[in-house]
Amino acid sequence: METFKKLGKFAVVFLVVLPLLAGAICLGLRVKLDAAGWASWVQAVGSITALVVAIFVMSRQNSHSAQLVAQADLLSLKRRAQTISIVMENAHDQVADIIHRIRSGTEKNDVGEVHASLASANHFMGDVHRTLTSIPLHDLGSADMADGILRITQVASVLVATSKIDVRQEGIAGLHILLGALLDKSNTGIRTFRKGVAGYVA
């Protein structure tokens, strides 16, 4: 199919050039050119024909170059999406694990376990937050990917802040509800991110 397309484009060029050549010859016969006149006439027509062909070839090369650049950009975006996907999946897993560990303590109303889990949250979620904020969102080429990263980044930020509260004063029940909302937001974030990645790697 691609070969036929190329032949078709060259056929268009010949369909344009040949009538011009035929017209030039007819015009030369009509004005009854002598040998010297024919030489000049053929040279002029040849120069114009060469110019038309050169313009066509240049346009083909430019089109091909633009296509190669577009393909290279798409390949770069695919590789970037696949790499960041590994980071995001890991971040989501850590968020979910921390939340489940803290909720295990809140469900048992065990303040000691909750505090221990919150201490872990401060360390691990701090790493997650720093990692995700280092990703250049403007280079992703996908609003869904950027939105998903932002959602999980916000969850990690809230978990870091939550790790510093005094559960005995704030209340375990309220913390349990907050953790549920954060888990929902993280799950929404990873789904949105995966949707954006699917647009590149499908």
Image (spheres, rainbow, N blue to C red):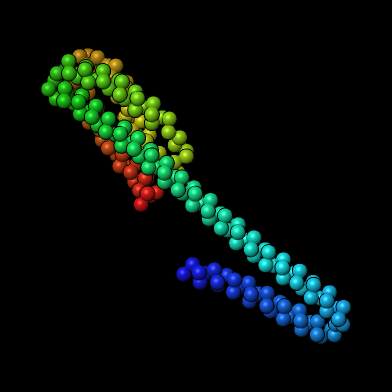
Q: Can residue 158 be seen at all in this image of the molecule? A: no
- Residue at horizontal 39 percent and vertical 49 percent from the top: 200
For the question of whether residue 42 can be seen, the reply is yes
Nearest to the observer: residue 92 or residue 29: 29
* 117 vs 50: above or below: above
Residue 146 vs residue 80, the one in the foreground: 80
Asked if residue 117 lies left or right of residue 195, the reply is: left
Viewer-nearest residue: 199 or 17? 17
Measuring from the top left, give residue 127's x and y in whole percent. Answer: 35, 25
| Relative image position of residue 106 (x, y in whole percent) | 16, 23
The residue at the point 85 percent across, 85 percent down is 32
Pinpoint residue 154: horizontal percent, then vertical percent. Answer: 35, 29
Is residue 91 placed above or below 108 in the rendered structure? below
In the image, is 111 to the left or to the right of 15? left
172 above or below 50? above
Point out residue 66 in the picture as x, y percentages from the top left corner: 56, 54
Could you tell me which residue is drawn at 21 percent across and 17 percent down? 116
* Residue 171 position (above or below residue 30): above
- Which residue is at the front of the view, 98 or 73? 73
Q: Quadrant of residue 54?
A: bottom right
Q: Residue at x 50, y 69 (%)?
A: 3
